[in-house]
Image: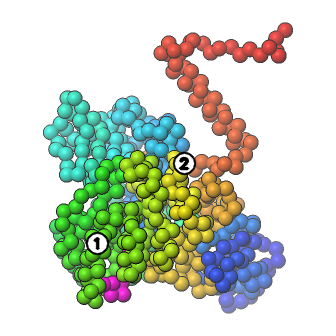
Amino acid sequence: MPVGGLVPRATDNAADLVVRNAKIHTGDPVRPQAEAIAVRDGVITVVGDDNDVAPQVGPATKVVDALGRRLIPGLNDAHLHVIRGGLNYVLELRWDGVPTLRQGLAMLREQAARTPKGQWVRVVGGWSAEQFAERRLPTVAELNAAAPDTPVFVLHLYQSAVLNRAALKAAGFTRDTPDPRGGQIVRGRDGEPTGMLLAAPSALILYSTLAKAPVLEGEDKKTSTRHFLRELNRFGLTSAIDAAGGFQNFPDNYSTVVELAKAGQLSLRIAYHLFPQTAGQEIDDLTRWIEMADPEDGDEWLRLNGAGENLTWAAADFENFAQPRPEHADYEAEFEKAVRLLMENGWGFRLHATYDETIRRDLAVFEKLAAEGLFPAGNRWLFDHAETVSADSLDRIAALGGAMSVQNRLSFQGEAFVRRYGPGAAADAPPIRAMLERGLTVGAGTDATRVSTYNPWVALHWLVTGRTIGDLVVRPPHNRVDRRTALAMFTEAGAALSGEEGLKGILRPGCFGDLAVLSEDYFTVPEPDIAHIESLLTVVGGRIVYATAEYEGLDEELPPVSPEWSPVAHFGGYQATPGTGLSGARQAELLGQAVAESEQHRQWRARRGLTPESASSFFDPCFSL
């Protein structure tokens, strides 16, 4: 957009992009605030004011006026299942942000009518019953009524799944189907499956059932991934560390992002991990991968970051807070083999560990190897999640040069955690301030897409307020962080966890040109509105990868969503709701919706004889004759 006062000059050092008239939070202690920024060849060249960037403006420079808005470094989700999420994104009906179960079921009913025979309607993560006004899950009967003939699979956290009658048939569940280890198929009086699946506590029953649904093929996988990355860019994300996960095989399921990277079509920087998929052959998998690749293979767009988040399946502790903590048999011997193999070959790793009981056992293995001089041997390593990690374990982690990555899983599971362990334990779940006070690098992420939403602002809201999406205060002030610290956990710390500190996470000359112009000022909006922030302009390496509002049309064009019946093509992804600062028009709209729902409730009562059939006439004595 043309900006007065910045006249293009003939120069050999012209910037590709200049953003000016912004309230820039740089994250750089040398210059924490600025008004303008210039990017050339993907790298920041100038951070300052109009006078500083003016010599960088050439005839081909794209100059964008931020209109006084807040500009921050691009966000980096330190634990996101972005590769798996991209392969499935356009097949999923997202309930992320949906305020009522009534609306969710209406979306499901409409999507079922649009879904062709042989395909499923799947709601997979990003929501919790606590976010709904009704505070409950959908029932099997409601799914059967919404979709009598189309298979419907609704995943609720790592706790349960609800299937309709058609999905039970498509998945092959009968009265003779045995319960898998660590899972339960709920059955009725007649012995037939009801449609409820429970993780007890293993989520493998949920994953394996979802894996029976049809998948995308060919170019559709690329299109789905590109649209998922664009959806992440919508919230100001410019980087992510992929934590791998179940049913994500290497190299097969990584080929889509590799092909997009080769074509220059990634709009998000990805550092990825490798996760052994089959219990009993973990050492064989790790050995094979070590022969195939080296950590940090790749470039600034796509690079290998190490192993994990599981190294051996026997050491995994499932985070279903509706169930007791899992008890593990001895796993240390095989786990030690895996860690020793990685250390001897220069591979770092990350470890899924929810409970301190698991963390203490893992640390004992690390300390044994450290006594031999084999750990950490200069390799990056970290614990993920760590909701119940103890002070003593944190001291041991710090002594071994480890790091932490925390996610807002308790945004969605806080109520379940409190019911099982009590508010005292929940207050320090996880003990973020204690981690930071020990000087540990603490990255922040979402663990999306099968539990939490991929919207990082929901996670930032949780870091700052300690509240769940159901508005329960879980973490008190002594275990919260201020807004600048929370942002640094989503920027600088994430860069450190992938060995890219000094290259991204801050805005200064020489760093990647990754930034976001926000819809609201993160540093001044009321706390409840943090979760409603989005990006209006997202830039990765000087490329405008997302643009809306005044900037609409400045981003790169994507191919249309495919297949055409995709839920994303109709509903989009995250369902945004307004913040607390409502306009009068929006308040009137919401009031009208409430009146309509009240009338529907009256009609329901009338059909059951609980109220007169006709609505009561309105009488106001002020209008009587």
Q: The residue under label 1 is which amino acid type?
A: Asp
Which of the marked residues, 1 or 2, is nearer the chain's N terminus? Answer: 1
Q: Which quadrant holds residue 198?
A: top left
**Whether residue 370 is situated above or below residue 135 in the rendered picture:** below
Left or right relative to 455: residue 90:
left
Q: Is residue 376 magenta?
A: yes
Q: Which residues are magenta?
A: 375-382
Q: Residues within 10 Å of mark 2 (few under 14, many from 20)?
A: some
Reading the image, the residue beneath label 2 is: 471
Q: Position of residue 574 (x, y in %)?
A: 52, 52
Q: Secondary structure at mark 1?
A: helix
In percent of the image, x 40 and y 62: which residue is there? 387
Q: Is residue 383 magenta?
A: no
Q: The residue under label 2 is which amino acid type?
A: Asp
User: What mark, if any, has residue 152 been given in the picture?
Assistant: none
Q: Nearer the viewer, residue 82 or 370?
A: 370
Q: Considering the whole magenta stretch, tell me its main secondary structure.
A: loop
Q: Position of residue 154 (x, y in %)?
A: 37, 44
Q: Are marks 1 and 2 in contact (CB under 8 Å)?
A: no
Marks 1 and 2 sit apart, C-alpha to C-alpha, by 34 Å
Reading the image, the residue beneath label 1 is: 362
Q: Which quadrant holds residue 251?
A: bottom left
Residue 123: in sight, yes or no? no
Q: Nearer the viewer, residue 88 or 357?
A: 357
Q: Quadrant of the N terminus?
A: bottom right
Q: Nearer the viewer, residue 162 or 233?
A: 162
Q: Position of residue 32 (x, y in %)?
A: 67, 78
In percent of the image, x 77 and y 16: which residue is there? 620
